[in-house]
Image (cartoon, rainbow, N blue to C red):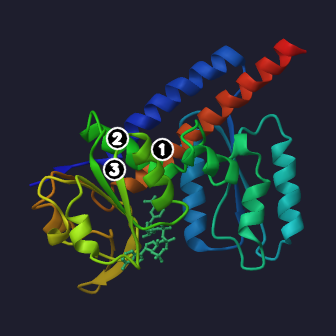
Amino acid sequence: MALLIDGKKISQQVVEEVATEVSDFIATYDVQPGLVVVLVGDDPASHVYVRNKIKRAAEVGLNSIEHRLPATCSQQELIDLIEALNNDEKVHGILVQLPLPEHIDEAEILNRINPVKDVDGFHPLNVGSLSSGKPSLVPCTPLGCMIMLKKVHENLSGKNAVVIGRSNIVGKPMAALLLQENCTVTILHSRTKNIEALCAQADIVVVAIGRPEFVSAHWIKPGATVIDVGINSIERDGRKKLVGDVDFSSVEEIAGAITPVPGGVGPMTIACLMKNTLTAAKIQILAKEVKHEFN
Ligand code: NAP
């Protein structure tokens, strides 16, 4: 049976580390790191995500603020809010909850966030830095996956890693992070031929496709580590249930280690948002000190 990679437990450790560092940061600089989450519209799932983020942020000692705009708000109103937050010294992290209403250009909005406040790591500058191996604010979900992988593998160098899914928010940054750790990385997607055979060669498999229980035991090399990013709501035996992209019950028989859903990658994503906000605050305070030094 595979080792269960407990996302709840590991995320709690991350959150506790961040809380300690936040308290040290406040004591050193007399500045409380601030996170603003912007929510546009009435999507019920987005409301739940934002509420959880705000709650967690307050728990670690961040100054967490939610900004709500109606679904009818214009692109310019949202840009004006982001500009105001970019110029607000008390705000160190800005997160615009996705998806945005259809009339708003998502890419344009993400481009407007100051890259040093971009705690989601979606700004092109941060994307470019990550893919060229430079320090950057890294998207929270892949960052969380990486922390979990490092709990299982002291050294990832030389491992064959497969990432299934090539989205900008999970698959691509995940592949970049694995490459930084000197893994040999293969990205598989909906057009990949022989996908099962390619997957079965991997020591590490990260799955982010949004297809319930799609990856089953014969895709997995015995002893491989499997990280399941998928969150899918299905109905089974007349009840709603959350499942991943991996068929947990068959894969846990063959894998060396596996994340559950729920309780795997999900809690790590929020914990990494806290971590990124602290990182953003550190970057901004250092930049301020350097500027002060040269003036
Ligand atoms: P996405 O943007 O829809 O991308 C899905 C990717 O999967 C695409 O690259 C697609 O390939 C690939 N794909 C779809 N069907 C496939 C198939 N049959 N075989 C191989 N590849 C296939 O999804 P996402 O935003 O990355 O999210 C993926 C999953 O992770 C979802 O369940 C989402 O809810 C979950 N998620 C969880 C967290 C968390 O915190 N735990 C965070 C983010 C996302 P093409 O590019 O060829 O179309």
Q: CA distance from mark 1 to mark 3?
A: 27 Å
Residue 70 falls in which quadrant of the image?
Answer: bottom right
Which residue is at 73% across, 25% downward?
285
Q: Are marks 1 and 2 in contact (CB under 8 Å)?
A: yes
Residue 71 falls in which quadrant of the image?
Answer: bottom right
Is residue 280 depicted above or below 1 in this figure? Answer: above
In this rendering, position of residue 97 left or right of residue 211: right
Residue receiving disc 1: 271
**Front of the two marks 2 and 3:** 3
Q: Residues within 10 Å of mark 3 (few under 14, many from 20)?
A: some
Which residue is at 81% across, 47% downward?
85
Is residue 88 depicted above or below 222 in this figure? Answer: above
For label 1, the SS is helix
Give coordinates of residue 288: x percent, y percent. Answer: 79, 23
Q: CA distance from mark 1 to mark 2?
A: 9 Å
Give coordinates of residue 120: x percent, y percent. Answer: 61, 51
Task: Say which label, 1 or 2, has the lower sequence index.
Answer: 2
Is residue 288 depicted above or below 201 in this figure? Answer: above
**Front of the two marks 1 and 3:** 3
Residue receiving disc 2: 10
Which residue is at 65% across, 61% downward?
97
Task: Say which label, 2 or 3, has the lower sequence index.
Answer: 2
Give coordinates of residue 165: x percent, y percent. Answer: 42, 68
* Tag shown at residue 184: 3
Q: Amino acid at mark 2?
A: Ile
Q: CA distance from mark 2 to mark 3?
A: 26 Å
